[in-house]
Amino acid sequence: GFEIPVEDRIGQIMANMERWRWLPRELPRNRIQVNIAAAVLSIIQDDMLIGSMRAVTGAPGHETPMLQSSIHSIVINPPWNVPTSIANNELWPRERRDPGYLARNGFRVISTGSGSRLQQVAGPHSSLGRFKFDFDNNFSVYLHDTPSQATFDRLNRLASHGCVRLARPAALAALLLSDDPQWTPETLQAAVDAGETVRVQLPSRHAVFLLYWTAYQTTDGRTVFLNDPYGWDRTLAAKIEARAQATAR
């Protein structure tokens, strides 16, 4: 394999250390973390990693944003309200090339008074799959299931429009609702099978962090370097360098 210059690695480490500084000194002991660059979701309880699953994160050009929030509800059998940009750039052109495509895939046009928007009804074809995890943020992103599980086997899993798709969303739903006696894995599955859209409020909000780590240490002390798919390391390292030179004068 080709060698990465030491300067680039130093820049990468600097950028990742700077991102650590943006986070609270103490993270919540129970939290969900998504490493956008690795396309992996980690579940942390009592500050210990108890599980992880493959994810699909935003493709370059449709970057998943870094943010911190808290999950407040899970939608079972969610319909998908299609963002205007995806409708105009991808779905309507597809319909023009292949008339009937939208109807076959469960899309319907909903009038909004001033215009119209596309919605994909809940069901086996829905792009959101059977589960959607909602948290407040300004980017309209969320965690969700997907009917196209094949993407999780690919080496490059940066393929979404910015939302985070999960390989095992039912397991995450069961974990988040483990304090709610009404929702066992069996009742969750029954709700999925019934096909109705149900919004379930969590008993208490659960912290979620979408982070971009391309250099980090594992629990056994190894340093792992990943590619910088969004080019964010280079930009940030250059800013840190410029700041250091300005203060050194």
Image (cartoon, rainbow, N blue to C red):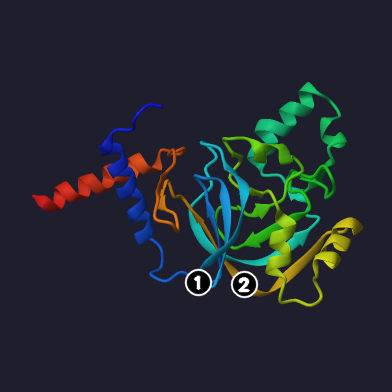
| Residue visible at 63% across and 38% down in the picture | 85
Crowdedness near tag 2: few (<14), some (14–19) or many (≥20) residues, C-alpha within 10 Å: some
Q: Nearer the viewer, residue 4 or 31?
A: 4
The answer to whether residue 112 is visible is no
The answer to whether residue 96 is visible is yes
Which residue carries the number 2 mark? 205
Question: Is residue 98 positioned above or below 67 on the image?
Answer: above
The answer for how far apart the CA atoms under marks 2 and 1 are is 12 Å
Work out which residue is located at the far left of the displayed protein and give it: 249
Which residue carries the number 1 mark? 28
**Which comes sooner in the sequence, label 2 or label 1?**
1
| Residue visible at 18% across and 50% down in the picture | 244
Secondary-structure class at tag 1? loop
Residue type at numbered disc 2: Arg
Residue 196, image x, y percentages: 87, 58
Residue 46, image x, y percentages: 54, 73
